[in-house]
Amino acid sequence: MLIRSLSIALALVVAQPVFAQTAGDQMSRTEFLAFGVALVRDDRAQDAANVADSLLASRPNDASALILRTEAAIKLGNYANAAKFAGRAYRNANSNNQKFGAARLAALAHSQLEQDTRAQLWLRRAREFAPNRQTAVEVAKDYQFLRNRNPWSTNLRFGVTPSSNINNGSTRESVTLFGLPFEFELDGEARALSGLQISGGVDLRYRLLRAQNFETQVMADLDFRTYTMSSAAQEQAPDARGRDFSDGTFSLGINHRQILAEGQRPTDFTLRAGQVWYAAVPYSQFVEASVSHTWELGPKDGLTVSLSHQNRKVLDDDDPTYSQIAGLSARWFHSFENKDRLSLGMTLSKSRSESIDSDYKSVGYRASYDIAKPINGMRLGFGINADTRNFEASSYAPGPREDNAIGVDMSVNFTNLEFYGFQPVVKLSARRNESTVDLFDRDYTSIGLDLRSSF
């Protein structure tokens, strides 16, 4: 068992309890508590429990006595009671060190009950009040052990992002359409609207099977984005609301990872199905299959190749449309001596659709560089991407259509700031799309705040 119990002596010394002498008592509470500590050291857990119960009889919310009672319950193998006492100790703690000791013991009790998700939550609380860096690292190692053992895995996401284009609108005020010799003026909703994007999501995983060379898990994913419009956007499109551009995706799937050859990394096979909503109205449904594999090209180099195929149905009561989208991507990555990481990638995709504006071929490129060593408490990452999308025809102009997009992004991970094991990450991005059909000329700039787990 990797989870390490604090000895009650350490927990109480770190907590630094202060008790007042009670008049008429032969032994002060401090001395009686120290006596209980000695009993635990001597493996006289039941006697220590009796001492703790005596202390709690007069002060039921005494955090130090509750910590003593927790440790005694753990030594007695009564983990359910230990979890309850530890929770009470945490709620009544009057110092950060007491909160740390109680949370660490609560995690131990829940882990012994194989309630790994609860234990992980308690370890995040313990990390928040860890007295030093070494102890914080130990908490992270315990968390990683439980994450590997726990069949359940939960990943939460939340972000707030100011954006210059929440509606995917055009940068132009008027455009040429259908090859006509005059321009059409775009209304406010068709042009780019600025505002605030609020996004969130949750990924749930449950491991069904695990063996030496394979693992199978089921998945449920939910993502949403909604918006608030800036005052300028509201003036430009007075009848629009931010929620008019909201979207959400829910999917269910299964993932199977298997080592197909000795000494190789596992290959991932994934199948999922889901639905997309736009403005709270069902928009499309999809089924997607993918496979990916990573090869180690050396001690510091690797190559990941992925294949995917998606069948999509765009919902329309009168005339739904169907698309098939195939994709191939490759990404090479290299780690330097200083732990910096360089990545270069390429993606090819082809969409065959009954809608000519969804029938295209595309090629995309991406390069990224992540700096491992924080600079003044900030870990930096940089990226640049470019892609070209070709359509054989367009509903808005005669002949083919070509879109060329380029984007840059930067992430700043503030490693000196942490809240229950999560660190803030600021992301800045800019992207421009230039099209032979000027309706699709678009610019995007955004700056967002996310939270990322530090372990």
Image (cartoon, rainbow, N blue to C red):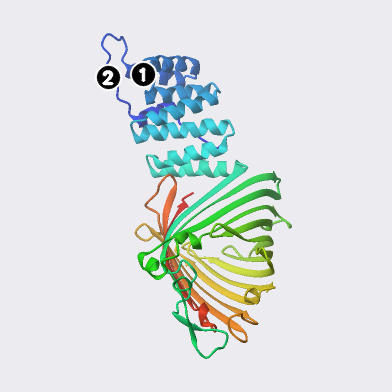
Q: Which residue is mark 2?
A: 20
Along the horizontal axis of the image, is 3 left or right of 54?
right
Q: Which residue is mark 1?
A: 59
Picture coordinates of residue 207, whole percent (x, y):
66, 45
Along the horizontal axis of the image, is 328 left or right of 185?
right
Picture coordinates of residue 429, whole percent (x, y):
44, 68
Quadrant placement of the N terminus: top right
Circle 1 Cα neighbour tier, 10 Å, few/some/many (<14 / 14–19 / ≥20) = few
Q: Secondary structure at mark 2?
A: loop
Q: Nearer the viewer, residue 14 or 400?
A: 400
Reading the chain from its start, which is encountered first: label 2 or label 1? 2
Q: Residue at x 46, y 63 (%)?
A: 338
Picture coordinates of residue 296, whole percent (x, y):
63, 63
Q: Nearer the viewer, residue 97 or 230?
A: 230
Mark 2: amino acid:
Ala
Determine whether 356 is above or below 243 in the image: below
Picture coordinates of residue 64, whole percent (x, y):
38, 25
Q: Residue at x 54, y 25 (%)?
A: 80
Please give the label number shown on residue 93: none
Q: How many marks?
A: 2
Q: Is residue 10 visible?
A: no
Along the horizontal axis of the image, is 374 left or right of 304?
left
Determine whether 196 is above or below 422 in the image: below
Q: Secondary structure at mark 1?
A: loop
Q: Residue at x 49, y 18 (%)?
A: 45
**Picture quadrant of residue 115:** top right
Q: Is residue 89 visible?
A: yes
